[in-house]
Image: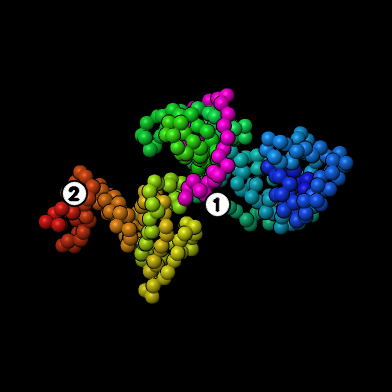
Amino acid sequence: MELIALVQSGSRHNAESLAHACGVSRRTLFRDLDLLRDAGIPVEYDEASQSYLVRGERFLPPTNFTPDEALALVVLCHELGDGRQLPFYRSAGRAARKIESTLPRRLRDQLHELSRVVQIELPVNNRLDEAEPVYRKLVLAIAQHRAVRIHYDSFADQQHIGTKLFAYRLLFSRRSWYVIGRSSLHRAVRTFNVGRILELTPLDEHYRIPRRFSLKRYLRNAWHLIPEPGPDYKVRIRFRPWVARNVAEVSWHATQKLQFARDGSLDFRVTVSGLGEISWWILGYGDQAIVLQPPELREIVIERAARLLGHYNHRVTIPSPRYIAAQQDGRITVRRRSDLDG
């Protein structure tokens, strides 16, 4: 059963990976492949991808779900496939209904009862209502290794740009779908928000995804999605007791290390590839977060906090960076760093 599912899954599996997944030797694997062919299942070896697959019709036999398995599948498909939680996956909801219809009545009734008490709420996402055709074209382009030309509303460039894109991966992260690939305009691998692609045209040009490419290698230690050039930074933030436990409950980054102090404050340490993204996260905690290192991150947070204060204090003008916010005579003031030094 497992071998059938693997060769008709659409994923690329060579003899070694199939043998490993099934827990058998290569010799046993080749014998089992021959048995499948003798049973009328057209298992083929594809030279281009160096993998075994079944083309055309599916031959997956009926599956006997346990209550836990059925509940997990149906809840996930219903909750994430309603169009709100995960854009473009309403088909998951339809799949859940099909799964339910094949279950025994007793299990189906039990499933309905259990699913009422389970709900999944992800962070508010970009609904991407009009971007589904673009997403579908990107899926097909990546599958066929075809380049596309996109017209893009660039946040970083603050203008509309055009580029030829060799798409490598589609990624849903936190609130939106992103496509990652090599951009001819930037001559580098870049990240594009699918919702900001204004127009997409498939091209006849084909390409290969570099064998060494992986999302993990591309993103490095980015706080979220944008790795910045240059060395990584070791960041240390002190969170005050009021928010310390809230911060500690979440796995924010793969490199994070936490240490509570006796007063209930939290030392949060992390290594990141760039300071831009993490600076906005820190500012979200207001006066409950204090950057201890590196100095470059302290400067960024101080400058942005000073500019924020300028919006609310008409006596303060922030014409350029390098300002310090300080408390004086019971009120917060902003002073130029050169004034302090002089």
Q: In the displayed structure, does residue 111 sit left or right of residue 302?
A: right
Look at 49% across and 57% down and name the residue there: 254
Whether label 2 touches label 1, CB < 8 Å: no
Q: Position of residue 282 (x, y in %)?
A: 37, 55
Q: Position of residue 106 (x, y in %)?
A: 79, 54
Q: In this picture, is 172 found above or below 117? A: above
Q: In this picture, is 145 found above or below 121? A: above
Disc 2 to disc 1, C-alpha distance: 41 Å
> Is residue 306 among the parts visible in the rendering?
yes
Q: Position of residue 268 (x, y in %)?
A: 40, 63
Look at 15% across and 57% down and name the residue there: 340
Q: Secondary structure at mark 2?
A: loop
Q: Nearer the viewer, mark 2 or mark 1?
A: 2
Q: Position of residue 302 (x, y in %)?
A: 27, 54
Q: Nearer the viewer, residue 106 or 180?
A: 180
Inspect the image, locate mark 1, and give the three-letter code of the amino acid beneath it: Glu
Q: Is residue 193 magenta?
A: yes
For the C terminus, the quadrant is bottom left
Q: In the displayed structure, does residue 160 sit left or right of residue 182?
A: left
* Residues drawn in magenta: 192-220
Inspect the image, locate mark 2, and give the three-letter code of the amino acid beneath it: Val
Look at 86% across and 45% down and name the residue there: 35
Q: Secondary structure at mark 1?
A: loop
Look at 60% across and 53% down and name the residue there: 119
Give residue 121's mark: 1
Q: Earlier in the sequence, mark 2 or mark 1?
A: 1
Q: Nearer the viewer, residue 238 or 127?
A: 238
Residue count near mark 2 (Cα–Cα under 10 Å), binned few <14, some 14–19, many ≥20: some
Residue found at the far bottom of this picture: 262
Residue count near mark 1 (Cα–Cα under 10 Å), binned few <14, some 14–19, many ≥20: few
